[in-house]
Image (cartoon, rainbow, N blue to C red):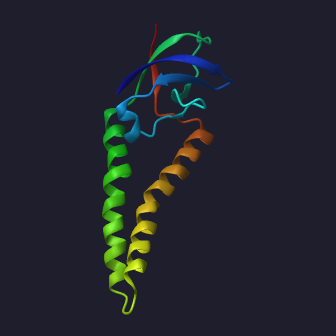
Amino acid sequence: MKEAGTIIKITEKKANVLLSRELSCAACNHCHSAEDGTGMIAEVDLIPGLSIGDSVLLESKPVKQVTAVFLIFILPLILFIAGFLLAQQIPGAPEIAAFLFGIIFAAIPYTVIYLLRKSKEKNGNFDFVIKKIT
């Protein structure tokens, strides 16, 4: 996936790039929303020669897109069904318990994604890399 954006902040080790919000943003998890809600902010490793206001072309590996779609949409659905069916095996459990088990199981991938994201940010590993300064 390739995205064009503008450098809006530079720190010692990273740069924040403002990207326009696209339909594909819902299934990506590479960025976080801008404070004003007008776009997405991607964190990238800082390279020499960057300055605020520069236009850059970012790239991520296609495998990460497929993985993101699986983790965000497919795995939670599978785990919801598994949790629902598991709770139905408990004798005397009401249907609401089965539904709650499904919700809890479906939340597992989102919790893992959140924790992995925090770990990546702490270690300075980012999903996008700068391919070109325009």
In this view, the residue in front, 125 or 115, is 115
In this view, the residue in front, 96 or 86, is 96
Residue 33 in percent (x, y) is at 53, 34
The reply, left or right, for residue 120 in relation to residue 27 is right
| Residue 37 figure quarter | top right
Residue 108 in percent (x, y) is at 46, 61
Vertical order, 80 against 86 (above or below): above
Vertical order, 128 against 49 (above or below): below
The reply, left or right, for residue 85 in relation to residue 130 is left
The reply, left or right, for residue 89 in relation to residue 46 is left
Residue 52 in percent (x, y) is at 62, 13
| Residue 105 figure quarter | bottom left
Locate the N terminus and report the quarter of the image it occupies: top left
Q: In the current view of this chain or complex, which residue is farthest to the top? A: 134
Residue 98 in percent (x, y) is at 38, 77
Vertical order, 107 against 46 (above or below): below
Q: Residue at x 55, y 52 (%)?
A: 115
Q: Residue at x 34, y 74 (%)?
A: 84
